[in-house]
Amino acid sequence: MKRLYWLLFGLTSLLHLVMLAIEQSMIAGLSKAFLMPLLTLFYFHSNEKPSKLIMGGLLFCWIGDVLLLMQNNPLFFILGLSSFLLAHFLYILGYRTHQWIKPTETRKVILSLSLPVCIAGMGLIVYLFPYLQEMKMPALLYAILLTTMVLVSIFRDGKTTSQSFWFVFIGALLFMISDSLIAINKFINPLPWSGVQIMLTYVTAQALIVHGLIAHPKKNE
């Protein structure tokens, strides 16, 4: 059953990206609404005890996806932003349940990855700040939580398998890139193929995160 949901997620993602590329907004919107439910079902059926935190994070991502279909309305944009804010918070907590308590070894990779992520997060805010107007504080809060979500994925290093670590980290980083593209596209300048860029990084991010969490062994063997 889980393979069926994974296949449906892949096909729906492809359909969505194609519809964005050819500007078929109605089909693109409908397909977008099915992405997170399918990925949630895949995650649920791939775990004996699926994390309620991750399930909740995926749920709020789905709510955010639907609300951002109407982002031209400022209220729906704020509500969508709030949904993703809650999703990132739940992911932060969920990552910590998909790791061993004690690290297997001390790793220098944590510092080497954390510093560039912090610089990128701060750089994005500095770049966006003059354009945000009344959105300055919500955007700052969002950027802090988003950066924290990526940092928490980095601190799983040595507390899970290499596959689980890299999948989740790269997924979290792509999530940060996707959200950054949304902000630049909305507040500074429209990007070419913005919908395709944003959603390609987003669906890839979510797929990698889910796969990485599934790959985490429950016991440190």
Image: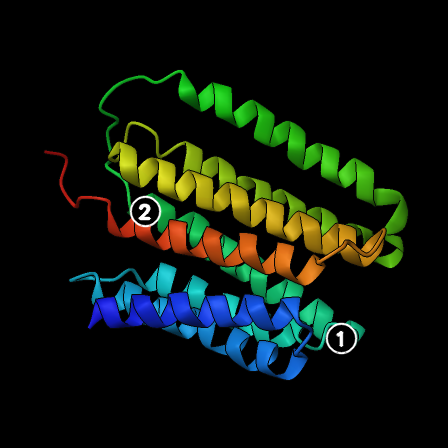
Circle 1: is it few (<14), some (14-19), or many (20+) Cα within 10 Å? few
Q: Nearer the viewer, residue 193 or 50?
A: 193
Q: Quadrant of the N terminus?
A: bottom left
The reply, left or right, for residue 72 in relation to residue 131 is left
Which residue is label 1 attached to? 75
At mark 1, the secondary structure is: helix
Colour pattern of the rendering? rainbow
Q: Quadrant of the C terminus?
A: top left
Q: Could you say where residue 163 lies in the image, as x and y percent from the top left? A: 28, 37
Indicate which label's residue lies in the foreground, 2 or 1.
2
Amino acid residing under circle 1: Leu
User: At 31% from the left edge and 66% from the top edge, which residue is drawn?
Assistant: 6
**Residue 103 vertical position relative to residue 67 in the rendered view, above or below:** above
Q: Is residue 193 something that shows in the picture? A: yes
What is the quadrant of residue 185 in the picture? bottom right
What is the quadrant of residue 155 in the picture? top left
At mark 2, the secondary structure is: helix
**Residue 148 vertical position relative to residue 2 in the rendered view, above or below:** above
User: At 73% from the left edge and 39% from the top edge, which residue is drawn?
Assistant: 124
Q: Nearer the viewer, residue 91 or 161?
A: 161
The reply, left or right, for residue 63 in relation to residue 196 is left
The reply, left or right, for residue 125 in relation to residue 36 is right
Amino acid residing under circle 2: Gly
Q: CA distance from mark 2 to mark 1?
A: 34 Å
Q: Is residue 149 something that shows in the picture? A: no
User: At 20% from the left edge and 61% from the top edge, which residue is drawn?
Assistant: 47
Which residue is label 2 attached to? 212
User: Residue 41, which numbered label?
Assistant: none
Q: Could you say where residue 108 lies in the image, as x and y percent from the top left? A: 40, 15
**Residue 42 vertical position relative to residue 206 in the rendered view, above or below:** below
Q: Mark 1 or mark 2, which is nearer the start of the sequence?
A: 1
What is the quadrant of residue 48 in the picture? bottom left
